Image (cartoon, grey):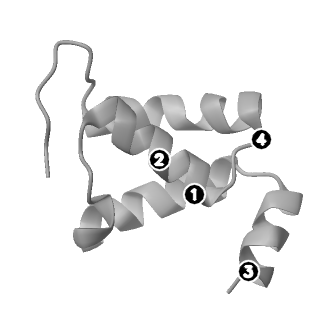
Amino acid sequence: MFRKSPDLITFSDALDQLPMFIQDTFADLDMAYDWLSEMTGIDRICDSKEMWHEFYECYYEAATWEQIKALNESV
């Protein structure tokens, strides 16, 4: 579930950087999730309700209306 590496950052730091990543790449939810997992080494963020909630709220706040519309249409 968690990999240790000197290049990994904390979940909190990754959430701080997530809005810029979303803006720079126009990342959808899946791409943002993969990026956060890669940056933190946490493979199963979705298994923690608290972490998933923090991630989703951060994504929702940073995403454009077009991205949110696409997300809502995909479910």
Distance CA(mark 1)–CA(mark 4): 11 Å
Residue drawn where x is 17% and y is 12% of the image: 6
Distance CA(mark 4)–CA(mark 3): 16 Å
Residue 33 location, x and y as percent?
Answer: 48, 52
**Mark 1 = which residue?**
30
**Mark 4 = which residue?**
26
**CB within 8 Å, label 1 to label 2:** yes
Which secondary structure, mark 1?
Answer: helix
**Mark 2: which amino acid?**
Asp
Mark before the other along the chain sequence, 4 or 3: 4
Badge 2 crowding class, 10 Å Cα cut-off, few under 14, some 14 to 19, many 20 or more, is few
Image quarter hosting the C terminus: bottom right
**Mark 3 = which residue?**
74
Badge 3 crowding class, 10 Å Cα cut-off, few under 14, some 14 to 19, many 20 or more, is few
**Mark 1: which amino acid?**
Asp
Disc on res. 34 = 2
Badge nearest the viewer, 2 or 4: 2
Which secondary structure, mark 3?
Answer: loop
Residue drawn where x is 16% and y is 20% of the image: 5
